[in-house]
Amino acid sequence: MTTMEILRQAKANAPLLAAADTDLKNKALNAMADCLLASSDAILAANELDLNAATHISTVMLDRLRLTAARIEAMAEGIRQVAALPDPVGRVRQQVVRENGLIIDRVGVPMGVVAIIYESRPNVTSDAAALAIKSGNACVLRGGKEAFRSANAIVEAMQQGLQSVGLPKDLCQLVQDTTRASAMELMTAVGYVDLLIPRGGAGLIRACTENARVPCIQTGTGICHIYVDQDADQEMALNIIENAKTSRPSVCNAAEVCLVHKDIAEEFLPKLHQRLSDRVQFRLDPTAAAIIPGTPAGEADFDTEFLDYILAVGIVDDVQAAARHIAAHSTGHSEAIVTANDAAAAYFTRTVDSAAVYVNCSTRFTDGGEFGLGCEMGISTQKLHARGPMGLEELCCYKYVIHGTGQTR
Amino acid sequence: MTTMEILRQAKANAPLLAAADTDLKNKALNAMADCLLASSDAILAANELDLNAATHISTVMLDRLRLTAARIEAMAEGIRQVAALPDPVGRVRQQVVRENGLIIDRVGVPMGVVAIIYESRPNVTSDAAALAIKSGNACVLRGGKEAFRSANAIVEAMQQGLQSVGLPKDLCQLVQDTTRASAMELMTAVGYVDLLIPRGGAGLIRACTENARVPCIQTGTGICHIYVDQDADQEMALNIIENAKTSRPSVCNAAEVCLVHKDIAEEFLPKLHQRLSDRVQFRLDPTAAAIIPGTPAGEADFDTEFLDYILAVGIVDDVQAAARHIAAHSTGHSEAIVTANDAAAAYFTRTVDSAAVYVNCSTRFTDGGEFGLGCEMGISTQKLHARGPMGLEELCCYKYVIHGTGQTR
């Protein structure tokens, strides 16, 4: 099927899912998990073909692409976990009873058709589908070409699950074209895509900003900062920076920049060097470079999402200067201050305009699971509609339902 | 100043307003109201020039454009009412305390710079500015050319109010260019406009859908339906249709289409004709045309926002057919069912995908004031971020503020 045919099917069938009750959606999700397990062999065979064809990608990417029986079990378990979450559809978010007797309910409703553009991790296919189905949205998935056969096998299994409970398979479809043309089609399918979620690198996000005519939520890019204040518990600061930089450098909530108050730089930087220099390369501004060894930072180093064992380090005059630096260089994802000074913490949290602003803890917590949302579709770094981790509620909008007894105005 | 210079000033000064406390913002709003009254003579003189130049527009438009001392007083009172509303900024919308001790607050924050494109009513200038300032947003106003001198005088007065409490006047600016070029500049000012709100006709909305690269909320166009079910209280239905069609036909929440269940058409349509035919022209589908006199409906009549004393009337088989008709022809604004049948009402409210769905009351209630929001920036007919009347909360987004004691992941 062409991408446009897929979108037409999704749009035509979306109302069925919007009207489905919680029980039916949960049955569908559990059946999707069952079918995923039952199709393990076919999925692994398809994945093997993908792996054999992927001779041009890095070891890290190959590992992301690889499926195993255990990984498929984890995917199925992830779907079941989404089934267990509360249903955002039909929830009355707010009720007002007016003097004229009108009862005005603000009710959670699905967006309609959600399209997701993502890259090579096959598990995103099932995660995204599960979140979309539970939130009452038909989903159109457009994965990377390296994982196409795997994703196709996964979607076929999930479609069997949908059909086994009497829902149309078109509620969950994979775009068959993995060239740029299909991404552009999704970005411009006004009237067919109610929400587009690009999950990927800066290039994909920029392409969506420039080309999207449909509602779109930018996700992901994280140049995250940690500011160590003069009043910081320095041991705590070391633990937080080590965790934020090294526990998983390839993810968007990993720290890329450390800013240190000038009055403690002479004391703190040698400790930072001692703690991290066996694993982390430093890119140092001139003041920091005068204190510890490391590569002098180029201008781009404070505007780069390294996604690697590299940390840019800069010295600032005070919390105000730290906030100004962040305003100039951040991608609006996650930033942290380490301080025992309440006034500095309050200034930082009030002034820094990012999705998640932390006091005395690691930026690595910006994650749907860690925030108690259960699971997430991505981390929004924009301000319209959703900010930070996008869970089921953020895949919905609302409508007003008003009950009267003949009122006129 | 050029539009780009205005935007740069707005962006540079927006953080000052974002950090302002409720008291300062309220003082600023009350000072803006005072200065508006103190500048009445200058504003009326500017308005006189606008009126004299507006030789080409209709009497209705001239009346919209005209200011009087009383209208300026009402504008000032409108600003004071916004000052009295609760502050959405800094409000903790939700708090989660996690097992690891992290305290996660979802806190209301301003968008940053809000740009509003509107037409000839000068009072929109003060309404929009008041809502923007109270919600902590710098505002860039781009009014219609007919009202330019009036809007300029109003903005100058409001700027005096801002300065009198120590805030920069650049927090509220009027774009000096009223050609299409300035609208396009606002639509494409990525990084300078955090939210664009076009208020106007279908042409402006379409231009924004096609051209906007900045976050944009579509407002306004309303092809509103009233469905009279077989189980309707027919006297109630007549009252509701009369109110929704004739109380103010020029507004977006006025009804344009009436759908009637086939089993009551023979009985109900003559009553409808008797109630409205002295003021309202009917555009009738073939079945309706066989029952009452009126103009046969052309295909376009069920897809037109008449904004006039015209009502399209169609006959449908049941509530399902009514919902299908609405899905095919509605602009997603407001729709109503009149019925005493709970199952039909439930089907209608669940299935109809519009911003406001009414049972047994008039579509005319879709309005910020009527919903208890105090005041509104417009009626969103899209699903991303805000739907229906946009009050202060809808001019804000949120961020997560997380307090810890050294937690790492």
Image (spheres, coloured by chain):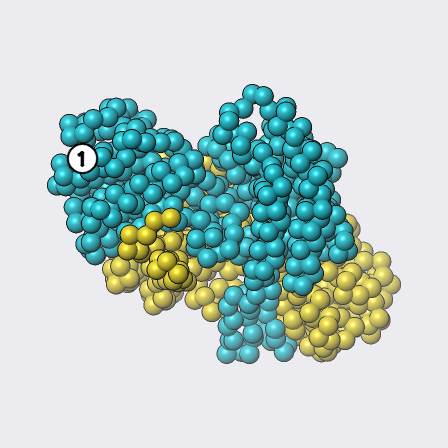
Chain colours: A cyan, B yellow
Q: Identify which residue, A385 or A387, lies in the foreground.
A: A387
Residue type at the position of mark 1: Pro
Q: Is residue B398 above or below residue A102?
A: above
- Name the residue furthest right: B290
Residue A15, horizontal then vertical, whole percent: 70, 55
Crowd tier of the residue under label 1, counting other residues whose Cα lies within 10 Å: few below 14, some 14–19, many 20 or above? some
Residue identifier under label 1 = A270
Locate residue B139, reporting x and y percent.
36, 48
Residue at x 34%, y 49% (from the top left corner): B408
Left or right of A210, for residue B400: left
Q: Quadrant of residue B286?
A: bottom right
Residue A318, located in which quarter of the rendered image?
top left
- In-image side of B57 versus B347 (left or right): left
Q: Which of these two is toward me, A18 or B162?
A: A18
**Secondary structure under badge 1?**
helix
Please state the total of marks drawn on the protein image: 1
Q: Quadrant of the N terminus of chain B?
A: top left
Q: Is residue B275 visible?
A: no
Residue at image location 40% in from the left, 60% down from the top: B98
Residue at 34% across / 38% down in the picture? A245
Residue at 40% x, 33% y: name it. A307
As drawn, is A349 to the left or to the right of B377? left
**Residue B290: % across, % down:** 87, 63
Q: Is residue A39 visible?
A: yes
